[in-house]
Amino acid sequence: MKFLDKVKVYVRSGDGGAGAVSFRREKFIEFGGPDGGDGGRGGDVFIEAVQGLNTLIDYRYQQHFRAKTGMHGMGRNRTGGKGADVTLKVPVGTQVFAEDEETLLCDLTEVGQVFRIAEGGNGGFGNWQFKSSINRAPYRANPGLEGEELTIWLQLKLIADAGVVGLPNAGKSTFLASCTAARPKIADYPFTTLHPNLGVATVDGQEFVIADIPGLIEGAHEGVGIGDRFLGHVERTRVLLHLVSAVEEDVAGAYETVRRELELYDEELAAKPEVVALSQIDTVDDETRRDKLDELAAVAGRKPFALSAVSRNGLNDVLRALKREISDLGDEVAEDQAAEDRRRFGAQLNDEDWRA
């Protein structure tokens, strides 16, 4: 299935139904009067995050969505039915932007989240609404209000626990294929990966999700190459795995190039916890490997892992380091939430004591 992470969509909610002009005239009924019912409300347009989707490919072939018009009012004070709603189902992690591509309308980060994008128009009043002491037989009814129409952008940012970054041919796809059931395309030329891939890794009985994005090159933040388009997919990750290939002549320069692009793209992304590994160590001899590990440690400011995804040498050590970082961040989030609950509930208790 083709990957699509950004699409333009036109939506329109339904118009309200018109009110009716009707009068009650029955044999043996002395007093009649207006009995035209109100029009029904137009259908709304919703966006819902659902399970089982990981791309916006469905919206490549259909970009126009219109909710139904409300039914018109009828005699005997019968109100028209509401128009049918339209629900756009999208993957978790989808952001909805206005037509300017800057105004964020909603961010769907959990399964089941629903947001109303366009509200249906109200139904018009029937003529019974205009009856008064001086106008006993109004021949007036309102048309329904028009629905809303707007153009929106859907942008998908994958939600994963760990994101793999690095230069092209750093071994990112091979790493993902070795530790998960994902089967990304692997070849010995740059930019083999053309779209992000997701996989679920397991270590010590615990699972977490890994995202692999296309390789970054110098100038990616300005649109050079293709990596800048997919950097948004690692914005939501908790930790980054930075792979530097042992084949690189200058491993320190390769590391600094990717770090620079991350910082220029988004400082918050560059500030995420990072696990550094020298990949493809099976392609060099022991002495070269030690020298490059020392060079990488000097520029990264930490001891890098030695990794070969093909032979699985060092694979579990890297996975354990990623899981440890993810668990530590989860504990911090839990502590922050507990502190917020204590603050909020403490304020409520103080308020109740004051009322008592």
Image (cartoon, grey):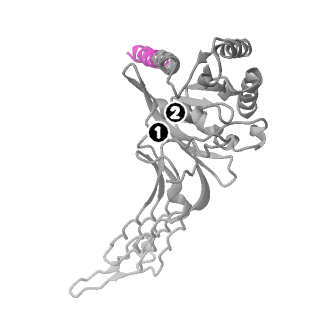
Judged from this view, the residue extending furthest toward the left is 28
Q: In this view, does 353 lie above or below 263?
A: above
Q: Determine the main secondary structure of the stretch shown in magenta.
A: helix
Which of the 4 quarters of the picture holds residue 7?
A: bottom right
Q: Looking at the image, do the residues carrying marks 1 and 2 touch, with CB atoms under 8 Å apart? A: yes
| Residue identified by numbered label 1 | 182
Helix, strand or loop status at disc 1: loop
Helix, strand or loop status at disc 2: helix
Where is residue 16 shown, x and y percent of the image? 47, 68
Q: Is residue 45 left or right of residue 239?
A: left
Judge the density around disc 2: few (<14), some (14-19), many (≥20) Cα neighbours within 10 Å: many
Residue 87 in sight: yes
User: What is the three-letter code of the residue carrying label 2?
Assistant: Leu
State yes or no: residue 201 in magenta.
no
Q: In this view, does 242 lie above or below 26?
A: above
**Structural distance between the alpha carbons of marks 1 and 2:** 7 Å
User: What is the three-letter code of the residue carrying label 1?
Assistant: Ala
Q: Is residue 251 left or right of residue 56?
A: right
Which of the 4 quarters of the picture holds residue 128?
A: bottom left
State yes or no: residue 352 in magenta.
yes
Q: Is residue 160 above or below residue 277?
A: below
Q: Decide which of 173, 57 is in the foreground and name it.
A: 173
Residue 209 in sight: no
| Residue identified by numbered label 2 | 176
Where is residue 153 shown, x and y percent of the image? 61, 53
Judged from this view, the residue extending furthest toward the front is 285
Q: Which residue is drawn at 68% across and 12% down?
A: 287
Q: Is residue 87 left or right of residue 216?
A: left
Q: Residue at x 70, y 11 (%)?
A: 294
Residue range highlighted in magenta: 340-356
> Considering only order in the chain, which callout, 2 or 1, is on the residue closer to the N terminus?
2
